[in-house]
């Protein structure tokens, strides 16, 4: 099951991942960024850090390594990445997640 049509009508983001790997839809404001991610292929995001991020897994599997500790998340699970925490992610094809970023301009909307 994909996100509802009205969410799919939200703008896409300019992310450094090919569109055949991940689809994005977003709601952006100065206060934060809400992103609806759909991964079409297995993908790994290398260690990095940024301001705070909170997310919930809708479908699929997500492996989050946060400050050296790895946890596996299933649908319905939530995760919190504190501002500045070094983390990496592995996701499987079919994974859908909703992530909220503290930075309203973490990713820019596609024009």
Image: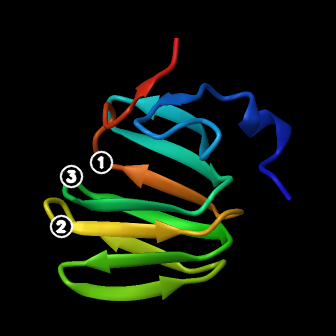
User: Residue 6 in the image: x percent, y percent?
Assistant: 79, 34
Quadrant showing the N terminus = bottom right
- Which residue corresponds to the image point at 65% horizontal and 40% vertical from the top-left? 20
Residues at marks 2 and 3, CA–CA distance in whole angstroms: 10 Å
User: Disc 3 on helix, strand or loop?
Assistant: loop
> Would you say 92 lies left or right of 110 here?
right
User: Residue 77 in the image: x percent, y percent?
Assistant: 56, 80
Would you name the residue on which mark 1 appears? 102
- Which residue corresponds to the image point at 30% horizontal and 48% vertical from the top-left? 102
Q: Nearer the viewer, residue 97 or 62?
A: 62
Would you name the residue on which mark 2 appears? 86
Q: Residue furthest left?
A: 84
- Among numbered discs 1 and 3, the one appearing first in the sequence: 3
Total numbered badges shown on the rendered structure: 3
Vertical order, 69 against 96 (above or below): below
User: Residue 4 in the image: x percent, y percent?
Assistant: 82, 45
> Would you say 31 lies left or right of 94 here?
left
Q: Callout 3: 10 Å neighbours few (<14), some, many (20+)?
A: few
- Which residue corresponds to the image point at 60% horizontal and 46% vertical from the top-left? 21
> Would you say 103 lies left or right of 34 here?
left
Question: Do the residues under discs 1 and 3 have CB atoms within 8 angstroms?
Answer: yes
- Among numbered discs 1 and 2, the one appearing first in the sequence: 2
Q: Quadrant of residue 69?
A: bottom left
> Would you say 86 lies left or right of 13 here?
left
Vertical order, 65 against 25 (above or below): below
Q: Quadrant of residue 53?
A: bottom left
Q: Which of the two discs, 2 and 3, sits closer to the camera?
A: 2
Q: Residue furthest top?
A: 111
Would you name the residue on which mark 3 appears? 51
Residues at marks 1 and 2, CA–CA distance in whole angstroms: 15 Å
């Amino acid at each position: 099951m994909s996100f509802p049509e009205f969410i799919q009508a939200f703008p896409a983001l300019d992310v450094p991942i090919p569109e055949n790997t991940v689809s994005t839809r977003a709601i952006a404001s100065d206060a934060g960024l809400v992103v609806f991610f759909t991964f079409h292929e297995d993908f790994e995001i290398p260690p990095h850090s940024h301001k705070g991020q909170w997310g919930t897994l809708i479908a699929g599997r997500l492996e989050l390594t946060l400050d050296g500790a790895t946890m596996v998340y299933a649908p319905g699970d939530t995760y919190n990445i504190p501002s500045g925490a070094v983390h990496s992610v592995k996701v499987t094809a079919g994974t859908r997640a909703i992530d909220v970023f503290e930075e309203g301009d973490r990713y820019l909307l596609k024009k």
